[in-house]
Image: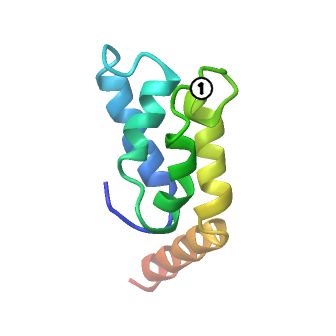
Amino acid sequence: MKSSDSFDVTQAHKLRQIFHNDPANFFSDGKKVLYSTSFLTGRAGKWIEPYLSNISNEDPSYLLNNWQLFVTQLFTLFGDPNEVRKAEQELDNLRMMESGQ
């Protein structure tokens, strides 16, 4: 996975593929989240540090124990706010190129 200050859909999909292909190692949300944190750098890396210092918290609603909450937080804090608009523009550009040929 690429290292950056943003988190995008492709990174989440890659992680889900890894988890799906290796269920013996990624059997819990906690395992998935901890593995994923190893790819966080920059602002996202600094954001996760306080959570990692409290890794012994076993509450299921705690960020490190809840995959969906973790991903939602990453997208909220570090996702591209223009992701949908960019995807729509890319599709429009493809359509224009196809009609011009």
Q: Tell me the quadrant of the picture where the C terminus can be found.
A: bottom left
Between residue 44 and residue 24, name the one nearer to us: 44
**In the rendered view, would you say 91 is above or below 49?**
below
Dot 1 lies on which element?
loop
Residue bearing the label numbered 1: 57
Q: Residue at x 62, y 36 (%)?
A: 63
Q: Quadrant of residue 82?
A: bottom right
**Which residue is at a point 57% across and 76% down the rendered structure image?**
92
Whether residue 7 is visible here, answered yes or no, is no
Q: Is residue 63 visible?
A: yes
Q: Quadrant of residue 54?
A: top right
- Residue at the location (40% across, 67% down)? 4
Which percent across, then down, holds residue 33?
48, 35
Left-right relation of 62 to 4:
right
**Is 59 positioned to the left or the right of 54 in the image?**
right
Residue 21 image offset from top left, x and y in percent = 30, 24
Foreground: 82 or 79? 79
**Residue 68: quadrant of the picture:** top right
Residue 40 appears left or right of 58? left
Q: Residue 97: percent from the left, percent from the top?
A: 44, 81
Q: The N terminus appears in which quarter of the rendering?
A: bottom left
Within 10 Å of disc 1 (Cα), the crowding (few <14, some 14-19, many 20+) is some
Model colouring:
rainbow
Residue type at the position of mark 1: Asn
Which of 46/54 is in front? 54
Q: Position of residue 7 (x, y in %)?
A: 50, 59
At horizontal 46% and vertical 58% (from top left) the residue drawn is 45
Q: How many marks?
A: 1
- The answer to whether 87 is drawn above or below residue 18 in the figure is below
